[in-house]
Amino acid sequence: MGHPLYFGYEHPWREFDRFLRESAGKGRLAVGIVFYLISAVAVGGALAAVLLKNLVHCALALTVAFLGLALLFLQLDAQFAGFAQILVYVGAVAILVVFAILLTRGSDLPKEGVFSKSWVVGLAIAAAVFAVLGWVVLQAGPWLPNETAVPAVTVNQIGQALMGRYVLPLEIVAVLLTAALLGAVIVAMHEKEGTKQ
Amino acid sequence: MTNPLTGYLLVAALLFAIGLAGALTRRNAILVLIGIELMLNAANLNLIAFWRYGPHPEMLTGMMFAIFSIAVAAAEAAVGLGLVISIYRHAKTTDVEQMNRMKG
């Protein structure tokens, strides 16, 4: 019955996926081991991006965090958003960050340390925010929506929605991106104009 | 934690807190921008998770919100990093604690 290459299973990946979904339905494994692994990648990358001393290492860790988030989007059956995340963040924003680090010689370690003088206050504020958010999420648990049906959304439907219901936001985002790109170039080239005069 | 949405919301809260801590405690302006990007991504994760587990996913509301948020965040990153480069050319520093003058 099963293919010998696949250890007797017809479609090992599909079987594994079904096992995860079934165990998620039973509440035994709340969201599945894949979710924990991907979350660990995303959170670990974010922690490394914030904590590492060398800015180039920070940019690399940030890319790992973005990749983990894209995998979380794929795990949530949002394929389009996941691949948009990979294209925009892993492809473009990470490269922009690396360019900015190299143009500002940010890889030199500062003498007075990488954390500001008031880092205790900042850490306390972040911890308080996480405590409040986590408490609210855990309290709201029973009232959160829980649709088990997998949404079957095609790129065709997303395109129809972008060109129909969401056409005005799409145009505004197009204008915003054009203005932001021109603005970024003008702001970054300002010094050159000053030397010409 | 029988509801998978709770797990995603907790991960998003953790990422938001990490980003906030980075934006508030680091000296380098580029790291502050990285923290802001992490916070925006945590919000996107919330939007996608609510779209997936909420009613009527075929209306695509959360997904569209996340896609527009990604586009706006890309614009923000471009302008922010352009500003950092401009300030570095002017003041020869990217330390936010030394950027204490409005006039060059």
Image (cartoon, helix red, strand yellow):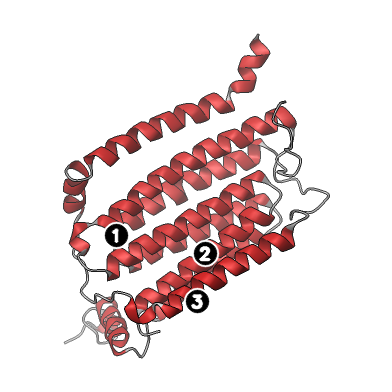
Pinpoint the chain carrying mark 2.
B
Give the quarter of the image for residue B17: bottom right
Query: Where in the figure is residue B30, as x and y percent of width and height?
Result: 62, 45
Identify the residue under disc 2: B15
Asked whether, in this view, residue A159 is left or right of residue A76, the answer is left
**Do the CB atoms of the residues marked 3 and 1 lie less than 8 Å apart?**
no
Q: Quadrant of the C terminus of chain A?
A: top right
Residue under disc 1 on the same chain as residue under disc 2: no
Q: Which numbered dot is residue A79?
A: 1
In this rendering, the label closer to the viewer, 1 or 2 = 2
Residue type at numbered disc 3: Trp
Identify the residue under disc 3: A135
* Distance of label 3 from label 1 (alpha carbons): 30 Å
Query: Where in the figure is residue A138, as x and y percent of width and height?
Result: 45, 79
Query: Where in the figure is residue A60, as x and y percent of width and height?
Result: 57, 54
**Do the CB atoms of the residues marked 1 and 2 lie less than 8 Å apart?**
no
Residue type at numbered disc 2: Leu
Residue under disc 3 on the same chain as residue under disc 2: no
Figure label count: 3
Depicted A151 relative to depicted A135: above or below = above
Depicted B26 relative to depicted A152: above or below = above
Task: Write the residue at 28% across / 71% down.
Answer: B53
Query: Where in the figure is residue A157, as x and y percent of width and height?
Result: 17, 53
Asked whether, in this view, residue A79 is left or right of residue B70, the answer is left
Pinpoint the chain carrying mark 1.
A
Residue type at numbered disc 1: Gln
Task: Write the residue at 28% across / 81% down.
Answer: A21
Depicted B59 relative to depicted A101: above or below = below
